[in-house]
Image (cartoon, grey):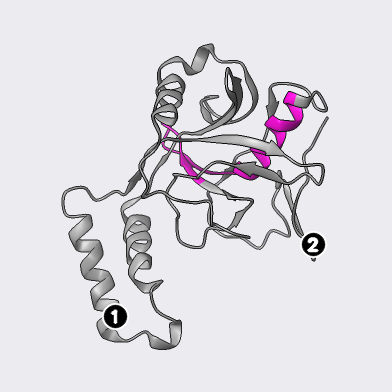
Amino acid sequence: MDGANSDPDESPSERELQVLQLFTTKRRKLQFLAASRCPYDERILAAVCRLADGLWAWHAGSRLSPTASRTEIESWHLDRFDSEEFTPEIYRQADQLADELLSDAPRYESPATVVRILSCGNDDTVRVGPWRGTRHALQFFANGLPLFEYTSCKCRRAYHVQLLALVHAGVRADAGTIRRGSHVKALPVTRASKSAGVAGLAYQFTDRGVQVALDER
């Protein structure tokens, strides 16, 4: 699982900005190959569609709670050290960083982003352009895309969009192997429980790595 294609600091290209504007202003008019929606109000959280120059994926962005925002920003500093190196001073520096960055607004926001889907090989490996989205703590990547991307809906509910699975669904729908308009379930962010599994999980973790397992009904 690799985030090598992730580059949130590099400026997006002119075409990426054009596509982002298209999704922002004319999203309701686009024909989606695959999408993840909020089950309560049907808002689109992420989607894949074909434009004139190929396949593109869009993600709505997120807005973390104040507590999660502090944890996220503190992790930026803590991740620079091995756990054996943690000291009270390092924790103090992480806390100070969160104080500075959240002084004007208590919630950390990640804007909407787009990524171009370049190809899908015979081995089902997806190749994409640079991922400009925020790399959150404890986030895992495969083929340059996050497996789960934290997403906020305007109804104030939060989800993990299975972004890699969504892109696979879009590629397969474009090829005609599954129906167009396929839905990839967004997993609600809830308190941890003793549940044996996660309903709607689109991944299988094997000794070969991450396998996408779509429900193609």
For image coordinates 52% across by 47% down, the residue present is: 149
Q: Secondary structure at mark 2?
A: loop
| Front-most of residues 135 and 75 | 135
- Residue 111 located left or right of residue 95: right
Residue 24 position within the rendered picture, expressed as x and y whole percent measured from the top left: 41, 23
Q: Is residue 162 visible?
A: no
For image coordinates 29% across by 48% down, the residue present is: 107
The quadrant of the rendering that contains the C terminus is: top right
Binning the other alpha carbons within 10 Å of mark 2 as few (below 14), some (14 to 19) or many (20 upward) gives few
- Residue 52 located left or right of residue 60: right
Q: Amino acid at mark 1?
A: Ile
Marked residue nearer the N-terminal end (1 or 2): 1
Q: Within the magenta stretch, is there residue 16?
A: no
Identify the mark at residue 53; answer none if there is no mark.
none
- Residue 125 located left or right of residue 67: right
Q: Which residue is mark 2?
A: 208
